[in-house]
Structure formats: C-alpha cells, structure tokens
Amino acid sequence: MLSIDIVSVLPALLKSPFEHSIIQRARTAGLLEINVVDLRAYGHGKHKQVDDYQYGGGAGMVMMVEPIYNCLKELTEKNEYDAVIYLTPDGKTFDQKSANHLSTMSRICLLCGHYKGIDQRVRDHLITHEISVGDFVLSGGETAAIIIVDAVGRLIPGVLGDESSALSDSFQDGLLAPPVYSRPAEFNGWKVPPILLSGHDAKIDEWRTEKSIERTRNLRPDLLEDL
C-alpha cells in the first residue's frame, strides 16, 4: 500500500477528486491511503495565519516557515517518509518515469505551495524533492497534487483491473501510445484497420509499434531524441 499525505491551506479543494473512479477504488481496496492535512491548523493567532509579506519588499505573500516546520515536524515524528515533496513551478518536471518511481514507495508527503511560494528555509532544510507538473503557474499546488496522485495511484499493483493496461500507456516506453479502436468495425464508412481484426498477435504488436513511432515522430519528435 502507498500512503500519501498532502499538506494544504485549502484542503476542501482535494476532497472530490479522490472520491471517484480509479483512485476511489484504490482507496476502497486498501491499496492507496490519502490523508489531507490542513496547514492552517498550525497557523498563528486567531486567524491561523500561514503567510506574511516577503522581506526585501515586492508583490505577493509568502508561506511562513514556522507553520510548515511545525506541521512537517509532527508528521515526520509519526511517519517515516520516502520523500517529502514540494510542488512548485521551478521543480523537476513530473513525467511517467517520476510516476513509476513514486509508485514504488511506501509513504510520501506532498506540500502544496501558494501565494508567492514558501520561505526558502523550508526548501533548504525540510524538503527532499521538488516537483513541477509543467512550465506554467497554478493558483496553488492542490491541482498539481491531484495530478500526481492520479498518475501514481493507477500504477500501484492491483489498482487497475488489467495491470498490463498501464504498461501500454503513453510514455511508458518513451513513445506515445498507438491509435485505438473499438466496436463497430465500420461506422459511417470509417473502418478499423484490418490488421486489428486479423487475430494475428505478432503482426498486431508490430503494427502498434510502428504507429507509436509514427505518432511520436509527428507529435513529439523530442521524445525520439531522448531515446
């Protein structure tokens, strides 16, 4: 089982996405545990403050070091983490290889950024990994956390009905997935490629590989360069 703790200032944003489809089935089956931790419980004063103006001036608030420290201190005293991950636009880009790696872990913690970011001292002393879901800025790390949990959760053995399905996903072998078809074999004059109806597994696999390479060359030639 993989356990994921998510530290957020807006925990309500994370409720619905994990209560449906594959992730919910994984939780029900006891293969995936998701715990959302409200950072404001560790905030200052009557209003549970977790952010303040940045030193040196400039626009935007910064998430304060003390609430995050107290939160992560409590969590790490109770749990042994394989990774404490800060979700930030300037982190390492998340990809299928990253998802595969995280799915082999036992427990991880995701810290959702907000505002102008978090106090650098958190990054220097409390974080083990930094991940970005793309070269763009979100309103908060919660959306990134949802993406990561979904990508990682479906890779846990036993989560998918057919575990070989995940192995044929795009990017698993560095290529985009080939075209897929279903019934009927002909619709509106549009036909399924005859090879897929042949029942010849070896030739079908060869066709799929060729189409994967062709699609990758046309849509993501950069992936072929990496290979």
Image (tube, helix red, strand yellow):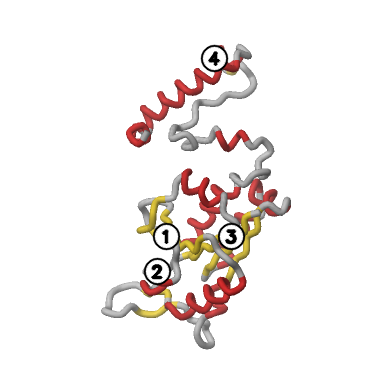
Q: Residues within 10 Å of mark 2 (few under 14, many from 20)?
A: some
Type of amino acid under label 2: Arg
Element marked by disc 4: helix
Q: Is residue 57 left or right of residue 51?
A: left
Residue 60 % position (x, y):
35, 72
Q: Is residue 191 visible?
A: no
Element marked by disc 1: strand
Q: Mark 2 sits on what residue?
A: 123
Disc 1, disc 2: CB below 8 Å?
yes
Front-most of residues 145 and 5: 5
Type of amino acid under label 1: Glu
Q: Which residue is rendered at x = 63% and y = 60% of the image?
A: 34
Q: Mark 4 sits on what residue?
A: 203
Q: Which residue is rendered at x = 61% and y = 12% of the image?
A: 198
N-terminal-most mark, 2 or 4:
2
In the image, residue 79 sits, relative to residue 145, either above or below, namely below
N-terminal-most mark, 2 or 3:
3
Type of amino acid under label 3: Arg
Disc number for residue 164: none
Front-most of residues 147 and 207: 207
Disc number for residue 107: 3
Q: Quadrant of residue 167?
A: top right
> What separation in Å lies between label 2 and label 4 (alpha carbons)?
51 Å
N-terminal-most mark, 1 or 2:
2
N-terminal-most mark, 3 or 4:
3
Q: Which residue is rendered at x = 57% and y = 54% of the image?
A: 105
> What separation in Å lies between label 3 and label 4 (alpha carbons)?
42 Å
